[in-house]
Each structure stands twice: as structure tokens, then as C-alpha cells.
Image (cartoon, rainbow, N blue to C red):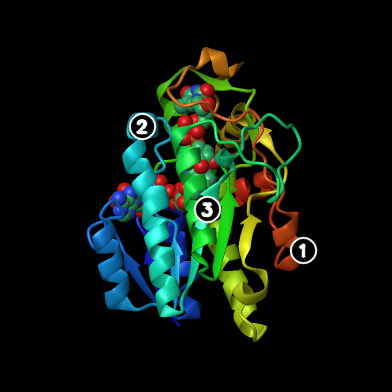
Amino acid sequence: MKILLTGSTGQVGYELERSLQGLGEVIAVDRGRMDLADLDQVRDVIRAVRPQLIVNPAAYTAVDKAESEPDLAHRINAEAPAVMAAEARALGAALVHYSTDYVFDGRMADARVESDAVGPLNVYGASKLAGERAIAASGVPHLILRTSWVYGMRGKNFLLTMLRLARERDELRIVDDQHGAPTWSRTIADTTALILAQARAGGQPWWEENGGIYHLSSQGRTTWCGFTAAILEEAGIDCKLVPITTDQYPLPAARPRYSALDSSRLQERFVRLPEWREALHLCLR
Ligand SMILES: NC(=O)C1=CN([C@@H]2O[C@H](COP(=O)(O)OP(=O)(O)OC[C@H]3O[C@@H](n4cnc5c(N)ncnc54)[C@H](OP(=O)(O)O)[C@@H]3O)[C@@H](O)[C@H]2O)C=CC1
Ligand SMILES: Cc1cn([C@H]2C[C@H](O)[C@@H](COP(=O)(O)OP(=O)(O)O[C@H]3O[C@@H](C)C(=O)[C@@H](O)[C@H]3O)O2)c(=O)[nH]c1=O
């Protein structure tokens, strides 16, 4: 199988480049080769490579900056995936895509299932939702994996930010009223590969019978402050931690208050997902 992988310099894409190796020939394209803001280039690269599968973790992920660059965020997160879907469909290929807990408004305290009503609070979430909808509307065989609060040992993420700030500052003031599930980039990549491998072993490709949206995040939930407490403990760093409210940390983009995802559907169909604390421990070890 020829697999076209985008975003291999990102957290999830980096892990996917390794995880997907056993499944076929992985052709990783970075921004230099395929700029998602250039829709003609996206089309041209797909037509040149002619993959059987496109895996697209590339995205505009700067949540606050997106508020002042809505058109660019929409092009990268919605229009480029729409082009990928149309091109994949024309080639008889399938598309694996990633989305976010930020498609939800976060008003309901219980974990969200795939069929729950969406209602993004910010430009990033709206652009990701538009990407989901464009793929679904295209008719391409697809899998959309919604995940949350992604971290890992490379790239720009909350874990690395906290490790840096804890060494630079005497105290960390962190919001304690936004709830979600931190998810290790490696969990996302390995689970993606396992789903694809299971589908292949099962004879009938999974996307023919079970395409659509699955939630893929670690089990359990915490707050950003709870996540930080665990990071400090796992890393053995002694730094004062002060829980604050969202109002005390104003940012351009609104964030959902509750955005934990219920990943039961994926776990029943494919594989168990780790507790967030267990995954954090493994990542830092
Ligand atoms: N990060 C998170 O907390 C969460 C992420 N997600 C979703 O998971 C997926 C993977 O996210 P993650 O790996 O964390 O993202 P990262 O921010 O770590 O990486 C984003 C990737 O997209 C690439 N990219 C951005 N703009 C362009 C462009 N114009 N053309 C080509 N490539 C581009 C980046 O390339 P470059 O290095 O050149 O900038 C990078 O490789 C995304 O769909 C994201 O929306 C979902 C929930 C949480
Ligand atoms: C750095 C810092 C952040 N915070 C708060 C701000 C914010 O409310 C919360 C999270 O911070 P960040 O801005 O790093 O996280 P954010 O960019 O909102 O993370 C999101 O990224 C996108 C891509 C997603 O898809 C989401 O699932 C989610 O992971 O922590 C503090 O309270 N104190 C601090 O010192």
C-alpha cells in the first residue's frame, strides 16, 4: 500500500511516520513539498504520488493565532482536507484525518460521544469542524479520529511548555476549570496503525463497513492544572503550582470548559486506550 503522509514535522505526524512503516510504503511530505495553504499544490502532489491511502495529521493548530487568521486556518483545516478527499475519491483511495475536542462547546460535563451536538467556540474549532464535514460530504472512504490535548517529547505542546516554565519560574499559575484528556502523540499514531492493520487482516477494509468519526483520546480526565501537577510529579520538579480560573488567564480564543471525549466506540471496535496518567508516565520515562 502506498501511503501519503502529511505533517511529518508535527507531533502526531512524526510518530505516524514510524508507526505506519509496517503497513506499506510511507511517502511523507512536509510543508516545503506540499503546502496545505496552496490547494493547487495539494492536488498536484496527490496526482503525482497516486497513493492508496492519505493520512493527514497536518493542521493549523495555533488556537489563539487562528482568531486573527481565520481564512488561513479555514484553508488549511477545511479546504485542503476537502481537496484531499476529492482527489482520494477520484483515485479510489481512502483518507485518515484528525480532528479535535474543540469542535464541542464544552457546556456538558460528561464525556462527549461521536454523535453529540457540536458547537465550536473558536476559529480553530470551527475550521476543524468544517474539515470533518467536507470529508464526510465528499463520499470518500474515510476515518476521522477526534483527539484532545496532544502532547509528546517534540514539537510545541503543553507538556514541553510546562517543563520549560517550571525551570524558569518560581510558580506556575494554571487554569483549573477546563477539563479534558491529555493524549500522547504516540498513542494516537500507534492506534491509527493498529486500526489500519486490523482492517487489513480482517479482509474487508474497515472503511467499507465502519468509516466515519471515532473519538481517540486517553481515558480519564483532568484539568490543565491537574495535568501540570502530574507533569511536575513525574519529572521530579519542585515548583509552586497555583490553580486559577479561565478569567484569570485571558486569551484571544475561548476554550471549552468540558471537552473530554468518550472513546468507547473505538475501544469496543479496535483496541483499549491507556489512562492519561499511565501514558504520561510512559512518555516521560
Ligand atoms: N495539538 C493538539 O493539542 C491537538 C491536535 N489535534 C489535531 O491532531 C492533528 C495533529 O496535530 P499535531 O501533530 O499536534 O499538530 P502540530 O501542531 O504538532 O503539527 C502540525 C503539522 O501540520 C503542519 N502544517 C501546518 N501548516 C501547514 C501547511 N500550510 N502546509 C503543510 N503542513 C502544514 C506543520 O508543519 P510545520 O512544521 O512546517 O509547521 C506540522 O507538521 C491535527 O489535525 C490537529 O488539529 C486534535 C486535538 C489536540
Ligand atoms: C502557558 C499557560 C497556559 N495556561 C492555560 C491557557 C489555556 O487555557 C490552557 C491550555 O493552554 P494551551 O494554549 O497550550 O492549549 P491549547 O492551544 O488550547 O490546546 C489545544 O490545542 C488544540 C490544537 C487542540 O486541538 C486542543 O485539543 C487543545 O490541545 O492552559 C495557563 O493557565 N497558564 C500558563 O502558564
| Circle 1 or circle 3, nearest the eye | 3
Q: Does the image show residue 34?
A: no
**Residue with the most extreme top position:** 248
Residue at 55%, 36% (x, y): give it. Answer: 120
Mark 3 close to ligand 1, CB under 8 Å: no
Residue 57, position as x, y percentages in the image: 44, 57
Residue 268 image label: 1
41 on left or right of 83: left
The CA distance from mark 2 to mark 3 is 23 Å
Residue underneath mark 2 = 65
**Label 1 to label 2: alpha-carbon separation:** 37 Å
Instruction: Please rate how many residues cluster around mark 2, counting C-alpha atoms within 10 Å: few if below 14, some from 14 to 19, many from 20.
Output: some
274 or 64: nearer the eye?
64
- Circle 2 SS class: helix
- Which residue has dot 3 on it? 133
Residue for point 36% across, 49% down: 76
